[in-house]
Image: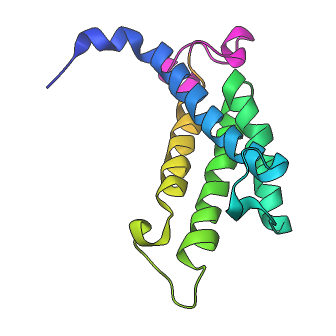
């Protein structure tokens, strides 16, 4: 089934997708670093999780405003892949492969959402677009 009338909303929806993805990652950074909201599993975090929180806070904020979108999203995609394998799949004695069983569903989803943003750019409503680094939702490669 094809919905051609929705195509005109693609640049704005890409910007909205980027904004929401950045906001969700930003909240994880705030929770890990500033303990707000108070969550028991972020009470005493090790340095590796603190570093992940710093990445999520800073790069999530960059995604929210759409600045350096592709680079920020690429780094966050790698961080989420690392988080899945180190924090979820191999956290016990034996590897647990199913995301429903190891709690890694969000990490996988964030990984691929950020990978998509790294490939597609920030959309029409972003600082990158305002600076002329992104001309449309397709980015530089769509113009060729």
Query: Which residue is at the front of the view, 36 or 94?
Result: 36
Confirm whether the magenta stretch covers residue 129: yes
| Residue at the farthest bottom position | 93
- Residue 32's x, y, as percent? 77, 53
Query: Which residue is at the front of the view, 99 or 114?
Result: 99
Which residue does the image show at 24% across and 13% down from the upper left?
Answer: 4
Which quadrant: the N terminus? top left
Secondary structure that dominates the magenta span:
loop
In the rendered view, tell whether residue 8 sits above or below residue 102. above
- Residue 133's x, y, as percent? 70, 18
In the rendered view, tell whether residue 118 sits above or below residue 43. above
Residue 66 seen by the camera: no
User: Which of the 4 quarters of the picture holds residue 78?
Assistant: bottom right
In the rendered view, tell whether residue 143 sits above or below residue 33. above
- Residue 2's x, y, as percent? 18, 21
Which residue does the image show at 54% across and 48% down from the upper left?
Answer: 110
Determine whether, in the image, residue 4 is placed left or right of residue 120: left
- Residue 126's x, y, as percent? 66, 16
Magenta extent = 124-144
Residue 87 seen by the camera: yes
């Amino acid at each position: 089934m094809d919905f051609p009338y929705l195509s005109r909303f693609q640049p704005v929806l890409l910007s909205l997708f980027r904004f929401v993805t950045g906001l969700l990652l930003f909240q994880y950074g705030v929770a890990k670093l500033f303990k707000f909201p108070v969550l028991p599993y972020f009470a005493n975090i090790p340095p590796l999780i603190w570093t992940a929180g710093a990445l999520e806070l800073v790069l999530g904020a960059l995604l929210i405003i759409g600045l350096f979108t592709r680079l920020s999203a690429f780094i966050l995609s790698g961080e989420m892949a690392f988080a899945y394998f180190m924090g979820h799949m191999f956290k016990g004695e034996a590897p647990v492969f199913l995301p429903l069983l190891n709690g890694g569903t969000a990490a996988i989803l964030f990984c691929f959402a950020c990978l998509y943003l790294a490939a597609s750019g920030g959309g029409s409503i972003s600082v990158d677009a305002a600076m002329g680094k992104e001309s449309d939702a397709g980015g530089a490669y769509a113009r060729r």
